[in-house]
Every structure is written in structure tokens, then in C-alpha cells.
Image (tube, coloured by chain):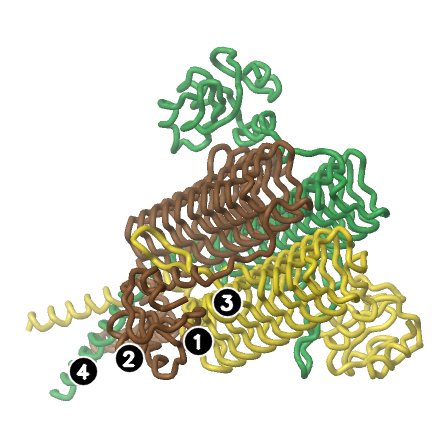
Chain colours: A brown, B green, C yellow
């Protein structure tokens, strides 16, 4: 693809010759037919050695290379460029005769269903959606248009998935929530008869689990991106455009606002409430209510700035602090004794 | 179902008219043909606005609604009611011709085996058990009666599962334990030739992994409920009626007593010993031996009360404490100097 | 197998009679035809009660039993012995007619492919490799010789796996990395068009997820052993012979050196750099750069010794320390007052 065509496609200006662009790669690895990119100034020294034919970057760095594609939102334009060169995963199309499609399921003619995929009674699979091998779509579950259900992901029965949803391999949607009644003879299962609704443009990572509600609905709102190995309990509601990073766990009935970022391995207790725009630092433990817009960290979570000081500055000096206090106590004691001694001497 | 019939079925009293109950829902969402429930006094204000036809609750709240089903163990009775209205997942019965059942496997006539399920040589699948699509039952593995193996769960060869066991989607039982011998040329795998035994009434969450023992047995005792994405190492033994919440990790050869609660994301080291009735707070790290009945939290775990004070009260004030100690030191130093100065003046 | 033959096979000396060895078991459980082993002196009292026919142990303990197999590297020799008695998992061989093998895939004649396994277009499956039921090998992916792909593991398209690699059930290799561009209308997916390379002798645990790179390569070097439920982000590079224990999470583009040990539930931030031979304590949180050979722990990680003191000695006493400091402040204040009072009295 000609650089000029690419620039037009993206609505960007370019400098240098109108070369042929054959792919996208990192500054390190790109060859002279490839486009690369620079976002972080930290890596600008790579501009001197890169063999990339052209570099997607912002104005200030465009002069440093012979050929630049100039962008105000490099990551967004990178996403668009990569999209032009990306080949989707998979090697089949159409509905395989080796799949199981229930006679009462409704699979759109434009959908792809791989061998060993299972589509249950009354399930709907929308236009352009791809169901890979070993994926399971339960009875009466609705999967919208242009979704990708990667191999061995599971969408249990009675759920509703919107459009443009991606489920990475092994993701499980609608497994039972963790609900038991205590009885004298042990924990009695409370059947989980609720559902899960996933809105448009949501992505769910590999081997992540999103439980169905006990009675009503576990809901993931549009545009939210969930990473791998995340656990989302029953009745949870996650707002729009959130980022939920790897191995986060969210307890039952918790409500997460819009635009929230939960960093890796964060744990959120059940029945918590996280306001819009909250950012929670990695490995933190959150319970109760978090004010919109706040940045918190630690277990239990406190203001991120406070945690940073307490944990990274103070904690390592804590053993020393104990010594200092002991010294103070001794000093003060001997002082008091002296004073007392002085008194008694008088 | 008539409310009177429901009350008889559960052995409970009811107040109000003998209406038809068509389902169960939350106070918020229930319609006038539905039963709802109230456990937590915090939500009692919802009694004023709910449209529920009847509310399952305890005596003190029964007067606040026109129609109540009165219970001493609301969650237990809720479990029973929901059970009456619940429709099990799935849309097939019988043994599918699209499944693979080894000629030497023994699948009970009353069992259900979905397409693309795999039942290995010499495996046993008991009466009423349902093996969903993509589930794997390895050679010589015994799966008892009335079990549910949800889609894509894996039960490797040579294991023993009792009755009434539920494996949520993607659960893996009997993968190899993590055992290697260090050698001059790297880590040599110690083949894991032990087994896993899961007793009756155990439930295992989505994408949870329970490793087979190195030589003998990893054991999960009856009635224990394991949540999603939990990791249980080789040779671990978990007692009866434990609750193991999401993303807990338990190291090899650890012994967990009866009635233990491990909250979300807890880590237990290998070779630890956790006494009966212990409760471990979320995200805590446990090693060594924990006394029966104790409540612990933190990493490494300490008494839960101590941790709560130390982590939630003291930690945020730690930077300030350092300042206070510094101030004390200065004050005392100037004091000492004055004193010394005074002395020298004499 | 005769003990003498076993000793010859392993190149070890033995004491006692040349009995028949029929299997391997723990000191507790072994019968008189079985070999057991003792590594940890803590368990030497079991030598008095064991019924094991022979004990694999080091010189000092050999005298304490009637029959010993004497080793300098007991775990290594145990691995070898167990290997002799181990029966590999599985009950089929050859390429099942119930598998899907793309006409343009290249599966070696000596490989085994189970029912419902999927081998994509242009994929290669090497000699002796076993692909269990429900496993997925994507298009153009190369799987080397003598690998085991356990049930329902997923290897997406365009990846390269070397020889002697084991993927435990449900492991996912090459799911999309977590990469999005922020735009005014939400997070736009950056297609992940890179790959994953796994070198020889690597093992990957149950339900672990290793993401494909954004543009270039996520790489796991030879001999590294990864436990269950581990998350490895895109573009990560893990060195040779590392041990990555259960539920560890590693953020994107992080580089881990050779011989590194990451204990259970450790989190490593993205773009971190962990030197050769580093050991990170369980549940720790690592960011930035860690010097080769260091032992760190805590969140954020500090020297392991410091963390141990700070967290296990100091933390529980922290509430008390606050009281002590308060007392000091009061004492010093009253002292100052007295001094001031004394002055004013003069």
C-alpha cells in the first residue's frame, strides 16, 4: 500500500517519499518497507538506528526521520494502520458440518461456525459472527453481530451478548455465581437463575470468568475491556469504557462506574461501589465506597499518594523506626531519671 | 404454584392471600406474581416500594408486607424456593452420537453426554450425571451420580469424583502438579502419578485448577465449595464444608481443616497447615501453621484485628509518624544540648 | 523391576536385598514392594515406621533402613525412577477420524490426535506429539516433536512451539494481548498481529494464558516451567530455566532474565526488567528494574530481608508503636512545660 494512500485513508499528512508500505513493526525490527511508530520520547534514540521505511509519530519527532506520518493520536492511528495489515485469526468460513447446531438455533448465513462448536436450542448467532472450535453457546443465548468467540470459550444458556464482542479463548460467561445458604448440614446451593448481559464493543480476555446473576443480571456495559484471568462475581455491574486488567477479582453485587481502571490483581470486595473514573493501583484491595475520580491503592485501599509514601518510602524504614523510637524512649527515661535524680539530690 | 402449596412444601407459615407464585426475583425487580426475599435489614426500605406478590423474610419484617412467607433461615428457604423454579442449564438428554465414548467406558443409561464430550477407556459416569459439550473424562476416572460437568471442563485420567459434584465450565481436575528436580542442566520433571479425589457435594468454579498429587492423593472433602480461578496444588487436602473464594491459591501439600473460609485472592504457601474453622481475610498470605478457629489477615498473616488496625488505621498515618518521630528526636536533641549547655554554664 | 537393575539404570549404589520394585510411593503409603524416598531430614522419623521395600535417600540416612538406594541428588533420581513406573495420560494413539485436521496441515505419522482436536491450515505437528481432545492448533502454527497438548488447551494461529513442550489442560497460548488506543469515543483495539515463541522443554500449567505480541514476539525461553493460572502479557520475554509459580501475573513488554523464581501470586508491572537469578517472594509487586541475583518481596518490592522484618515483625506492632510515640510526645511536652515552668518560676 502506497504511503500516500495510507495517509489519505487515515486523514494524516506525511513527509518524505511516497514509498510502498508492506507492514507494521517496532522501531527495532521494522524493515525498510515497513511502517513503525514512536509514542514515548524515551525511545526516540531508536529513530537514529531504525530501518523503518516510515515512522508514525507526532510533529516534534517528524523532522528526525526521512519519512514520517504525522499524528495527534499515535496509538489510535497505529490501531487503524495495523487493522489495514492484520489478518484475522482462523482458516475456515461458513458453518461446519462438524459443528453441532441445534435445529431450533438461529445462526445467520454470514456467520462462521467451526468444527466442534456447539450452538444450543433457541440460541441466536448474529451476522458476521465467528464461533471457533470448541466454543459453546448455550440454549436461548443471543450473540449479536460481528462477534468473535475464540476456541473453547463458553457462553452458558439464557445470556445476551451485543455486537462487536470478542471473547478470547477459554473465557467463561455465565457460569454459576457463588451462592450458598448455610444449613446445619452444610452449604446448600442457591441455584443461580439470573443472567449476564454484555453490551457492544466489550472484550473479554483468555480464561476470564464472568458469573451469571443469582436472580437478575450481571452486566458489562459497552466498550469495557477485560483482560485475562479476571473473576467477576454474580450481580456485578461494570460501567462503560472501563479497563479491567489481568487477574482482577470483583466480588458479588459490586457496582463499578464508567471509565474506571482496575490495575492488575486488584481485588474488590462484594457489595462495593466504585465511582466513575476511579483508578485503583495494582494488587490493591478495595471495599465499601470509592469516590468518583479518586486514585487509590493498597490493602485496604487508601489515597494512592499516601500508599506510595507509606509502602515504598516508610515500610522499608520501619525496622529502623522501631529502633529510633526505642532509643528515644531510653533517652527520655534516662533524662527523666537524671531529672528525678537531680531532684532527689537536692 | 400456589403460595399455600409452596409454604407446605417448605414447612413454613405465610400471611396474606393464597396467590399464585410464578417465580423468584429481587425486591427491586419482582412483579406481583413473584416471590422476593429480605435478609439484610439494610434493605428493609425496599419493602415499601416492592411489587413482589410475597416476601420471604423473618418474623420481624413479616408485618411490613401484605403477604409474607416466614422463615428462620431465609437463605436456605430461598435456595429451596429457587430450586423449585430453576430450570437446569442445557437442552439435550441421552448420550449423543457426536460424543466420543470409549467402548470400554461405563456410562449409565440415565446419564447425559453432549456432543464433543470425551469419555476415556475404563471411565465410569454415574446415574443422572450430565457431561456437557467439550468436557473430558480421562481413562479409568470415576464420576459418580448426579454430577454436572459443564462445558469444556477437564477431568484427567485415574481420578475419583463422588456424587452430586458440580464442575463449572473450564475447571481442570488432575492436571500435573508442579514438581521438578533441579539438575545441572535444568529442571527435570517429576512425573505426577498421583490422583485427585473429590468427595460428594463439592462444587468447583469456572477455570479453577486442582492438580493431581505427585505420588498419592490431592483430596477435596465433602461439601466444600470452591469458587472460580482457584489454584490448588498437588497433595493438598481440603477439609469438609470449606469455602474457598475466587482466585485463592494453595501451595502443594498444604492441609486445610474443616469449615475453613479462605477469602478472595488469599495465597497459602506449600506445606502449611490451617486448622478447623479458620477464617483468612481477602488477599492475605498464609504460611506455616494456623490455630483452629483463628481469624487472620495480612501478608504474612497475623490476627485479623491487628492487621485491620495496622493496615487501615496505621498505614495511612505512617508518613506522618515518621515526621513525628523526627520532631521528637530534634526536640530531645535540643533539650539534651540545653541541658548540657546548662551544665557547662555551671 | 529388580532393585539391582534399577540401581544400574540410575548409576547408583544400593544396600540390602535385591528385591522386586513394583512402584513408587510416599514413606507413609508405600508397601513392601515399593520404593520410597527421603529428602527432608524433618521426616526422618518416618524411616522407623515405613513399610517401603527400599528408600531412595542420601548417604547419612541409608544406614537407618534395611534397603537403601543412595543418591546425591534425590529429587533428580526420584524423577528418573518415577519416569520408569509412570504411565502417560491418555488411552488412544494415532490420528482420530473424529479430529479435524485441515488438508493443508502437516501432522507427523507418529503423532497422536484425539477426537475433537482441531489442527488448522498449514499447521505442523511434530513426531511423537500428542494432541488431546478439544485442543486447538491454529493455522500456520508449528508444534515441535514430543510435545503434549492436554485437553482443551489452545494454541492460536501463527505461533512457534519447540520440542518437548507440555501444555496442561486449558492453557491458552497466543490469545490477543491487551492493547487499546484511547479515542474520544472509547478504547480502540490495536490488533495484536505478533506471535509467541516457546522454546524446548517448557511446561505451561492449567488455564495459564500467554498473550501474543502486539507486533513482534512474546518469548518463553527453554526449560522454563510455568505453573497454573499464570498471566503473561504481550511482548514479555522470559529467560531460560525460570520457575513461575501459580497465579503470577506479568505485565506487557517486561523482560525476565534467566533462572528467575517468581513465587505464587506475584505481580510484575509492564515494562519491568528482572535480572538473572532474581527471586521474588510470594504475592509481591514488582515494577521497574531488579538487580540480578537479588531477593525481593513486598508491594512495592524491597529487599526480602527488609520486607520480612517490616511486614512480619513490625507491622503487627505498628498500633503499639503509635501509642509509644504518642506517650513520648506527651512526656516530652510535660517535660518541656516543667522546664519552662521552672524557668518562669525563677
- Drawn side of residue C291 relative to residue B193, left or right: left
Gap between marks 3 and 1, in whole Å?
13 Å
Gap between marks 4 and 3, in whole Å?
68 Å
Gap between marks 2 and 3, in whole Å?
27 Å
Residue holding disc 2:
A64
- Drawn side of residue A118 relative to residue B338, left or right: right
* Residue closest to the eye, A169 or B264: A169
Q: Secondary structure at mark 3?
A: loop
Q: Are marks 3 and 1 on the same chain?
A: no
Q: Secondary structure at mark 2?
A: loop
Q: Nearer the viewer, mark 2 or mark 4?
A: 2
Q: Are marks 2 and 3 on the same chain?
A: no
In the rendered image, which quarter is residue A296 located in? bottom left
Of the 4 image quadrants, the one containing the C terminus of chain A is bottom left
State yes or no: discs 3 and 1 in contact (Cβ < 8 Å): no
Q: Nearer the viewer, mark 4 or mark 3?
A: 3
Residue A275 — which label? none
Residue holding disc 1:
A30
Of the 4 image quadrants, the one containing the N terminus of chain A is bottom left
Q: Are marks 4 and 1 on the same chain?
A: no
Residue B337 — which label? 4
User: What is the count of numbered marks?
Assistant: 4
Is residue B105 visible in this depiction of the protein? yes
Gap between marks 2 and 1, in whole Å?
17 Å
Gap between marks 4 and 1, in whole Å?
68 Å
Chain containing the residue with disc 3? C
| Lower position in the chain sequence, tag 2 or tag 1 | 1
Q: Secondary structure at mark 4?
A: helix
| Image location (x, y in percent) of residue C163 | 68, 72
Amino acid at each position: 500500500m502506497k504511503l500516500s494512500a495510507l495517509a489519505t485513508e487515515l486523514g494524516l499528512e506525511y513527509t518524505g517519499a511516497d514509498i510502498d508500505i508492506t507492514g507494521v513493526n517496532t522501531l527495532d525490527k521494522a524493515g525498510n518497507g515497513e511502517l513503525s511508530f514512536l509514542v514515548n520520547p524515551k525511545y526516540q534514540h531508536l529513530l537514529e538506528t531504525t530501518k523503518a521505511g516510515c515512522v508514525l509519530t507526532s510533529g516534534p519527532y517528524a523532522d528526525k526521520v526521512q519519512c514520517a506520518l504525522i499524528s495527534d493520536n499515535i496509538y489510535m492511528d497505529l490501531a487503524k494502520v495495523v487493522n489495514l495489515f492484520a489478518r484475522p485469526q482462523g482458516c475456515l468460513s461458513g458453518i461446519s458440518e462438524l459443528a453441532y447446531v441445534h435445529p431450533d438455533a438461529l445462526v445467520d448465513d454470514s456467520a462462521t461456525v467451526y468444527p466442534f462448536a456447539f450452538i444450543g436450542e433457541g440460541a441466536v448467532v448474529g451476522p458476521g459472527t465467528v464461533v471457533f472450535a470448541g466454543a459453546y453457546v448455550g440454549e436461548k443465548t443471543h450473540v449479536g453481530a460481528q462477534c468473535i468467540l475464540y476456541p473453547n470459550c463458553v457462553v452458558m444458556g439464557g445470556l445476551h451478548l451485543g455486537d462487536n464482542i470478542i471473547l478470547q479463548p477459554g473465557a467463561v460467561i455465565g457460569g454459576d455465581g457463588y451462592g450458598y445458604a448455610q444449613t446445619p448440614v452444610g452449604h446448600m446451593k442457591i441455584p443461580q437463575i439470573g443472567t449476564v448481559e454484555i453490551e457492544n464493543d466489550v472484550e473479554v480476555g483468555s480464561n476470564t470468568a464472568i458469573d451469571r446473576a443469582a436472580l437478575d443480571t450481571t452486566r458489562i456495559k459497552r466498550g469495557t475491556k477485560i483482560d485475562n484471568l479476571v473473576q467477576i462475581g454474580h450481580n456485578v455491574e461494570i460501567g462503560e469504557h472501563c479497563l479491567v486488567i489481568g487477574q482482577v477479582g470483583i466480588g458479588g453485587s459490586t457496582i463499578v462506574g464508567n471509565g474506571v481502571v482496575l490495575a492488575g490483581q486488584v481485588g474488590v470486595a462484594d457489595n462495593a461501589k466504585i465511582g466513575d473514573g476511579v483508578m485503583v493501583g495494582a494488587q490493591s484491595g478495595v471495599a465499601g465506597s470509592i469516590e468518583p475520580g479518586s486514585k487509590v491503592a493498597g490493602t485496604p485501599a487508601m489515597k494512592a499518594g499516601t500508599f506510595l509514601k507509606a509502602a515504598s518510602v516508610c515500610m522499608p524504614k520501619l525496622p529502623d523506626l522501631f529502633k529510633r523510637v526505642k532509643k528515644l524512649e531510653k533517652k527520655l527515661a534516662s533524662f527523666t531519671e537524671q531529672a528525678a535524680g537531680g531532684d532527689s539530690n537536692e
